[in-house]
Amino acid sequence: MSSPSASSSSSPSSSLFPALTDDPSGRPALRFGERSLTYAELAAAAGAVGERVRGAGRVAVWATPSLETAVGVVGVLLAGVAAVPLNPKSGEKELGHILSDSAPGVVLAAPGDELPEALRELERIDVDVDVDGDGVGGLGGEAVGDEDPALVVYTSGTTGPPKGAVIPRRAVAATLDALADAWQWTGEDVLVHGLPLFHVHGLVLGVLGPLRRGGSVRHLGRFDTEGVTRELSSGATMLFGVPTMYHRIAEALPADPALAKALAGARLLVSGSAALPVHDHERIAAATGRRVIERYGMTETLMNTSVRADGEARAGTVGVPLPGVELRLVEDDGSVVAAHDGETVGEIQVRGSNLFTEYLNRPEATAAAFTADGWFRTGDVAVRDPDGYVRIVGRKATDLIKSGGYKIGAGEIENALLEYPGVREAAVTGEPDADLGERIVAWVVPVDPEAPPTEGELADHVARRLAPHKRPRVVRYLDALPRNDMGKIMKRALPS
């Protein structure tokens, strides 16, 4: 593993959020709906939580989109212990596995939240956001270091039970400081989003990010375009979202001039967690004059690349490596892809201070995830343009199709299909073929189910747009594509 970033600190835990102690003024820190906290109020409320959980080891947090979740996680970090965010939508089996694996000593929740049976044997602490006090007090200490765990975030578990990625304090600081550099993110920025708070995007970037900068976040509670319009029209400067959210924005824009005006006035529109279709990029740009920028990260690595605020917002790319992040593409045999030609596909491997420490209780899985010299195997496949921009074409396990001697990324075919007027949603997979090795299969949700585009029309469109060997050989029609909470298409759930 690489050494900690110079931007992180070995000083007490409160150094993750210097504004809590350096400037406990009346500046706004958090707002969820009508409820808000200044930095002074946050310091008092989070400090009180921290005093109660200090020494607890790991602390589960019932991560609803609420002020209590944000205060609870900040309090846990101030105490120098590790937070385990729990998805309130987790099923009984998944939740039981996470609790057994992480063995938290206590669970934080908002007063009045009804917790499932699996959590009722844990000591419960209700987070009080209305605390009078003097801030973070004596929390932290020299014993809290960069390599100490900040979070244990559980991955989606597509090939087995979810794995707990142990994210050290060093990685949180390094990734947020690198994004500050790339996005020119300062304490003057006001972020609006409606993302869940049990994963990296909504919690680390969307809550801890503004607090590390000394800025503020306005959480919508639940995403809707009316909320986006309201907040961007009243002082918010940045919007974070996932492709499903930006697709809804693109659909609403033609009939909503107020939304177009609000987006046009934003300093930064950022999409992540999955690829934003090029078609939606272009519709938003045409209506607002502003381009959405994309970044690329995952639970184990936090953020790896981004389009820079002072760079070209090129649709279909996730930009360049962030400061402090090394990135390379490798072939199946482990050899490094030397060509940056925008065509040669390889698996992304990364190295840097943004990486997680280990999978909790999974030494074999941890060892398998890294090369001997410390590169993390992401499992994502991409191409790299001559100027260094990275274009992700999918997951190695589900999105890399080997057909007729070619390596083909599903992502570019999906983008091409979405440009066809009769296609509402599209996913691409490969299936065994005696002649080609694998044939390309398109799963399409048509705009008009009574008159869907034909297989020949779609194949010809892709062949003209990309290349003949990338055309789908089979088209299957669906009413909707299976998606997870973040809007990612779950290809393993497609009908067999």
Image (spheres, rainbow, N blue to C red):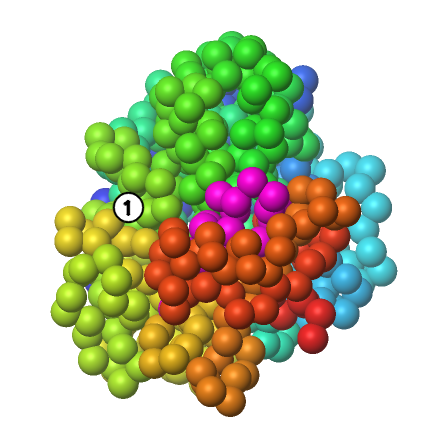
Q: Is residue 403 visible?
A: yes
**Residue 31: x, y in percent?**
58, 23
Q: Residue at x 30, y 39 (%)?
A: 314
Observer-nearest residue: 403 or 126?
403
Mark 1 secondary-structure assignment? loop
Observer-nearest residue: 298 or 455?
455
- The quadrant the N terminus occupies is bottom left
Q: Does residue 5 appear left or right of residue 66 in this picture?
A: left
Disc 1 marks which residue?
A: 319
**Residue 287: x, y in percent?**
46, 20
Q: Does residue 309 appear left or right of residue 392 in this picture?
A: left
For label 1, the crowd category at 10 Å Cα-Cα, with few meaning under 14, some 14 to 19 and many 20 or more, is many
Q: Does residue 63 appear left or right of residue 389 in this picture?
A: right
**Residue 111: x, y in percent?**
77, 37
Q: Is 204 above or below relative to 494?
A: above
Q: Quadrant of residue 223?
A: top right
Q: Is 25 above or below relative to 446?
A: above
Q: Residue at x 33, y 70 (%)?
A: 347
Q: Residue at x 44, y 83 (%)?
A: 436
Observer-nearest residue: 477 or 487?
477
- The quadrant the C terminus occupies is bottom right
**Residue 472: x, y in percent?**
51, 65
| Residue 424 part of the magenta segment | yes
| Residue 272 part of the magenta segment | no
Total marks in image: 1
Magenta span covers which residues? Answer: 408-426
Q: Residue at x 77, y 47 (%)?
A: 450
